[in-house]
Amino acid sequence: MEKISSFQVDHLRLKPGAYVSRKDKFGDLTLTTFDLRFKEPNKEPVIDQPALHTIEHLCATFLRSHREWCMKVVYFGPMGCRTGFYVIVEGDYSSSDILPLLLEMFDWIEKYEDAIPGASPAECGNWRDQNIDMAKWECSRYAALLKKRKMENLEYPSDMV
């Protein structure tokens, strides 16, 4: 079998950021997958499971409710390695296109005070496994990194794939 594209990225050199992971074309339709890398792989502790789960609930809710992006968001979910998340959107986009949306989302999470969306037995198969305080901390840390780096159209460097 061929090695999938995400396993071809050199995780020993990958830094936190928001990268265009891939673009898939289906006729006239393009899906852009973003790698929202919160942690430096194999160097930083991964996101703990309850925080990861809460971030998933909050971000998915925000993105699927966003007035401009709700119809473009296909998927938001965690990486199995727990170093970040994937977001898939309909359209041909760059990291600079999605950066304002990400910053708006993390600002919303920082201010969020209600119950965690979807965190009930009827709505989630592991509803108790949540930690909103750690989720907020992880999102705040990541948002600060994005602001500091003033990221523009990041893609994996060609020598990393």
Image (tube, helix red, strand yellow):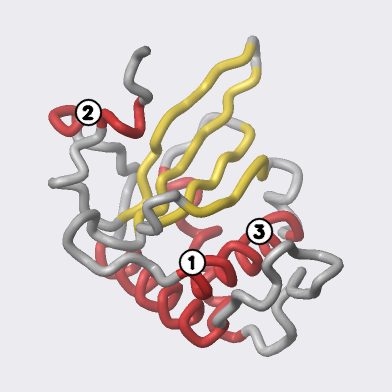
Label of residue 161 in the image: 2
Q: Check disc 3 and give the amino acid type.
A: Ala
Residue 102, given in percent of the width and then of the height, sits at 50, 61
Residue at image point 53% right, 76% down: 107
Q: Nearer the viewer, mark 3 or mark 1?
A: 3
Residue at image point 59% right, 50% down: 76
Front residue of 110 and 138: 138
Q: Quadrant of the C terminus?
A: top left
Front residue of 80 and 106: 80
Is residue 12 rendered to the left or right of residue 134? Answer: left
Residue under pointer 3: 60
The earlier-in-sequence mark between 3 and 2 is 3
Q: Which secondary structure lies at badge 3? A: helix
Label of residue 103 in the image: 1
Q: Which secondary structure lies at badge 1? A: helix
Front residue of 156 and 68: 156
Label of residue 1 in the image: none
Q: Check disc 1 and give the amino acid type.
A: Leu
Q: Check disc 2 and give the amino acid type.
A: Val
Relative to residue 45, is residue 10 depicted above or below? Answer: above
Whole-number angstrom distance, CA of label 3 to CA of label 1: 14 Å
Number of numbered labels in the structure image: 3
Residue at image point 35% right, 58% down: 83
Front residue of 128 and 134: 128
Whole-number angstrom distance, CA of label 3 to CA of label 2: 28 Å
- How many C-alpha atoms fall within 10 Å of the one at disc 2: few (<14), some, or many (≥20)? few
Q: Quadrant of residue 43?
A: bottom left
